[in-house]
Image (cartoon, helix red, strand yellow):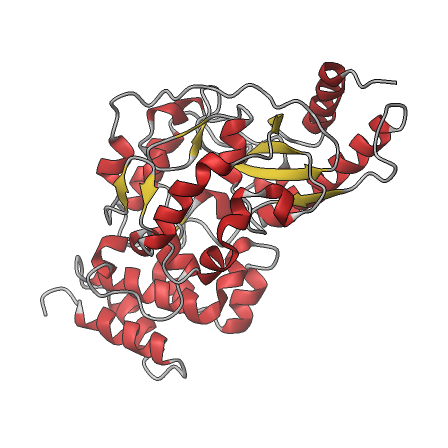
Amino acid sequence: MSIDHKLLLSQIQALGQTLGFSQIAVAPVDLSSAEPHLQNWLAQNFHGSMDYMARHGLKRARPADLVPGTLSVLTARMNYLPRDTTEGWQDKEWQRLRNPQEAAVSIYARGRDYHKVMRNRLDKLAQQVDALLDEALKPERFEYRAFTDSAPVLEAELATRSGQGWRGKHSLVLNREAGSMFFLGEIFLNVALPASESTSAHCGQCTACIDVCPTQAIVAPGLVDARRCISYLTIEHEGAIDEALRPLLGNHIYGCDDCQLICPWNKFAQTSTLPDFDVRAGLVGQNMAHLLAWSEADFLRYTEGSPIRRIGHVRWLRNLAVVAGNALRQTDDTPLRQALQAHSAHPSDVVREHVQWALAQQHGV
C-alpha cells in the first residue's frame, strides 16, 4: 500500500492548525549547500560566546547526523503576537522604546516560554501523525524528535527550504502573509515525505532592518554579528557588556525587536490563536526603578514559566543597570539613582561594575 503524500500532508496541516500552528510544511534533509555560509559565520566568530554553535559545527546542516534515520523534516510556524494586539502596534512599540523611563522587553518574551508551548504541541502533532500512518505504509517503528530552538538545528534554513518564507536581510524568516513575528519548530521523521515548494525572496532593495539596528549588528544582508546584537548581549552573553555598546542598548532589557518593527512585511503580522502568548502582568510598561527593586525571589516569581527566567537575576540586574544608565544620561531621576545605589554592594562583580557605570552617566555630571 502506497502513501498518498499530498493527502497525508493536508491532514497533517489540518491537525497542526487545531494545535495553533500557522503553517506546516516539509523540508529536505540535504542542507549541504548551507554549510559554507555556516562555516564562514563561525570562522568570523560572529557566534560570540555561544560556544555550542561551534561545538556542534556542521551537524546543524546535517539532520540525519543529528538524528540518525531522519528521512524528512516537518517544519512548523506559530504566530506569537498577543491576541489583543491592535492595528498600529509597531507605532506603539516605537513609543515604548522612546520612553527612557520604561524597560522594554521583546514582544516574544512577554508571555509563556515558547520552548514549552511549541515543544508540547510539536509532540502532540507527531503523535497524531503516527496515528495517521497506522493505515499507510510506514516504518516498523515510527520515530521522531521535536525541536524548537533547543538543538543544533538550522531552523531558518529548514523553514525557508520548506516554503515557510525567505531569509530577510536581518537573517530572520519572512512570510508574505505573516511577516516575521512567529516561532519556528521542527519534527525530524524517519518517514520520507516529499519536500514542500520553497518561495522566492521579496526584500528587494529595502535595507530598513540594516539601517535601523542600534548597534549595526547586521554587517551584510543576511549576516549578523551576534557579538553586537542586542538580543545576544541581553540574553546569551554572560559577563560584562562592552562599554562602547552600552549606550546603544537604549532601554532594551531583554531582547530587541527593532529590525522587525521597521520591516514593511510586518504590517501583515498575524496574532496568535493561543492565550499562552498573551502579555503577563508585571513585565510590560514597568519603570526601571520598580524592576531594579525586585529581589532574586521576586525575579523568580514574576518570571516563572517565562523565557526571561533563564538569564537569571544577575544578568537581569546587569541589563537594568545599563538601561538605567542610559536613562540617567537624559534626565536626573532620583528614584532611579537610588534604586541603582541599592545594588552598589551586590555580591556580583558584574552587577557592581555596571551599577557604577550607570551612576556615572548621571545627567549634568
Viewer-nearest residue: 95 or 123: 123
Q: Position of residue 11 (x, y in %)?
A: 75, 20
Viewer-nearest residue: 129 or 98: 129
Q: Position of residue 197 (x, y in %)?
A: 55, 18
Viewer-nearest residue: 340 or 156: 156
Q: Is residue 60 visible?
A: yes
- Residue 53 horizontal side relative to residue 48, left or right: right
Q: Position of residue 223 (x, y in %)?
A: 32, 41
| Point 86% across, 23% down: residue | 136
| Residue 252, placed above or below residue 261 | below
Viewer-nearest residue: 214 or 60: 60
Number of marks in the rendered image: 0
| Point 17% across, 57% down: residue | 330
Quadrant that contains the N terminus: top right
| Point 82% across, 33% down: residue | 130
Q: Quadrant of residue 234?
A: bottom left
Quadrant that contains the C terminus: bottom left
Q: Quadrant of residue 148?
A: top right
